[in-house]
Amino acid sequence: MKVTCDREKLREGLAVVNNVIPARSTKPVLENVKLVAKDDCLELVGTDLEVAIRYKLLSHQQVASDDESAQSDTHGLVEIAEPGVAVVPARVALDFIRDLVGNTVTLETRDNTLHIFSGPDTCELVTADADEYPTVNQFDPEDSFTIQGGVFTRLVNQTAFAAAREAGRYAMHGVLMDLSDETLKMVATDGRRLALTSHPIPTTGYSHAPVIVPAKGMQLFCRVVDDPLSQIAFHFYENEIGMQAGNAEVFARLIDGEFPKYAAVIPSSTAERMEADSDLLTRKLRLVANVTGAEARAVRLSMKTGELVLAGHSAGRGEAHAEMEVEYKGDAAEIAFNPDYVLEGLKHCEKQTVALEFNDRLSPGKFTLGENYTYVVMPITVDAT
């Protein structure tokens, strides 16, 4: 293998791929990046067996043939002198190429080493056996659906934070993707809160059974979306999902498990409804939460006509109260939440006014954070006065 490419573009590609590659693994070959020089591109491949990425640096000829206006663009500029494969330590390669000062870098395999040149600076990396490197899928554009990159990123940001992190029901460690009725729906929950969002997708009748995608995979999908206005494509495989965005192809192994019956958690009817300015509610909630401790991480929301009072306390810190005007009618009511959960949801609120609905202090609180964005938080019974 012998290729010459733009150093900064190679650094960018290696940085993206290193997001997947583990620093330490019981399978040492996974700590490497696989470089595949083809006639028209240099592929950078990385995987941890749960998620994988194939990042392509296109040759100058390929860039020009795709778009004549791009002939002066050096995006992913690569010159392939000799095709081939090299598997080398990922972070060492990234660190060395990052610190080079030349504009171009040459990669050349000799025996069991990869030589890296840039002007007078050189590095020799020992290569691993390419046959031992796991097979990473190729994206199949057939039978796929597309969505605008910025829309997809927004849907992920509105849900992935609510996925479970601690050990437990493995199915909760991912985001449910449900594509049906020309609508893409995403849901995530950890059992204490649930985020649900959706967006219309004109898929000309395309649908697929709901799948659970690891939160790590979702985050990687978003990381490779460099243009929010561009269209990205998805393809469902038997046990994984693939995404193509620009020069990147990302794959995530699907979680095998039964996702909670989330529809049953969302209140269909409620007795109480409050509307408040989302920014002001965020500030007041954060203010009161400052005094709460880990042993009683709760803030009580007390409502009466036109007014909300927030209260929190901790035996070792003290207590705090805050008031704000809200839209609320009816008899006085109260409910307590973990403020961290509520604040995480409000961070992604799309509306100036947020609505909170519930039936009583023991029932779930339903926050409407957008036109098609619902966030449900289970209440806390700890006294917050």
Image (tube, helix red, strand yellow):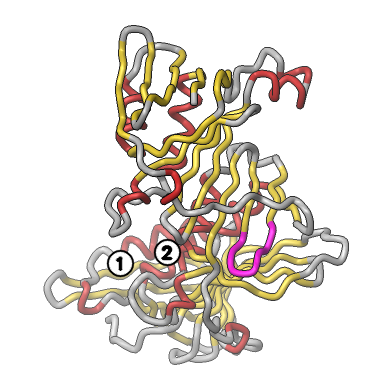
Q: Residue at x 41, y 41 (%)?
A: 33
Q: Which residues are magenta?
A: 235-241
Residue 58's tag is: none
Q: Quadrant of the C terminus?
A: bottom left
Q: Residue furthest front?
A: 111
Q: What type is the residue that disc 2 sits on?
A: Leu
Q: Residue at x 65, y 38 (%)?
A: 246
The answer to whether 371 appears left or right of 342 in the picture is right
Cβ atoms at labels 1 and 2 below 8 Å apart: yes
Question: At which x and y percent is residue 31?
Answer: 34, 47
Question: At which x and y percent is residue 192?
Answer: 42, 80
| Quadrant of residue 73 within the rendered picture | top right
Q: Is residue 351 visible?
A: no
Residue 289's tag is: 1
Question: At which x and y percent is residue 176?
Answer: 58, 71
Any magenta on residue 239?
yes
Q: How many marks?
A: 2
Q: Is residue 13 visible?
A: yes
- Circle 2: is it few (<14), some (14-19), or many (20+) Cα within 10 Å? some
Q: Nearer the viewer, residue 261 or 249?
A: 249
Q: Nearer the viewer, residue 135 or 112?
A: 112
Question: Where does label 2 land, which residue?
Answer: 343
Question: At which x and y percent is residue 49?
Answer: 44, 59
The secondary structure type at the circle numbered 2 is helix
Q: What type is the residue that disc 1 sits on?
A: Ala
| Quadrant of residue 70 within the rendered picture | top right
Q: Nearer the viewer, residue 308 or 230?
A: 230
**Mark 1 → mark 2, Cα distance in angstroms:** 10 Å
Q: Residue at x 35, y 49 (%)?
A: 29
